[in-house]
Image (tube, rainbow, N blue to C red):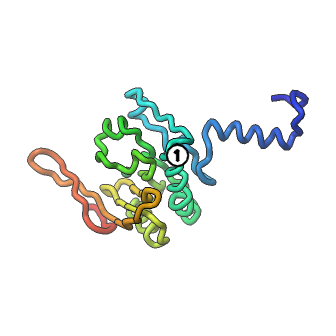
Amino acid sequence: MQPGDNPLNWETMAVYDAATEDSVDPLLSKNFRLSEFTTSETAARLGISMDLSVEDPAYLNLINLCVDILQPLRDRLRKPLIITSGYRPKKLNKAIGGSKHSQHIQGLAADFIVPNMKPIDVAQKIIDMDLPFDQLIHEFGRWVHVSIPQIRSQRRSQSMTAIKNKTLIGYTTEYLPGIQPVA
Ligand SMILES: [Zn+2]
């Protein structure tokens, strides 16, 4: 767009350009953009669409997840949160072996790490800050899973630690109560 192309003044054009940019990868909160929750190597490899329209309830859920939990945590830590798994269309969730009722499918959950912080310390911070999570899982000592409740649903306030157990037929996942160290 060039000045003189239209009756808008420069200031309005700046707003327009920002809006145009945001429509490509909108901000969900101050420091989180939609693409951070809709980028998946597995989806790309398998040709699974990660498109999420504003009308999809999962879109609003992602905004609430950012506003209620991820943004306040980021503000307190003053460190970036790296989202390793956010929104998962059913096909993607199935492909990666996610639980059938995973809250990732509805955009209610995110897995993330914070560079230079142990996941257990990040999870503990979420508890210390009294953030309104539905489920908080310290996953295998490797990352943090956090979710918000479905709109109009009761908050479970569950915190757990996932560990792997070796069995004769392979590995199984066990959930221990609370946020604990993983051996
Ligand atoms: Zn997760």
- Name which residue type carries label 1: Tyr
Q: Is residue 157 above or below residue 31?
A: below
Q: Is mark 1 within 8 Å of ligand 1?
A: no
Say left or right for 168 vs 37. Answer: left
Helix, strand or loop at mark 1? helix
Residue in front for this viewpoint, 120 or 133: 133
Q: Position of residue 20 (x, y in %)?
A: 70, 36
The answer to whether residue 178 is visible is yes
Q: Give the farthest residue toward the left.
A: 168
Q: Is residue 132 above or below residue 52?
A: below
> Image point 38% across, 51% down: which residue?
103
Q: Position of residue 4 (x, y in %)?
A: 90, 29
The answer to whether residue 84 is visible is no
> Image point 42% across, 59% down: which residue?
149
Q: Please state, as top left, top right, bottom left or bottom right, where the N terminus lies in the image.
A: top right
Q: Which residue is mark 1?
A: 59
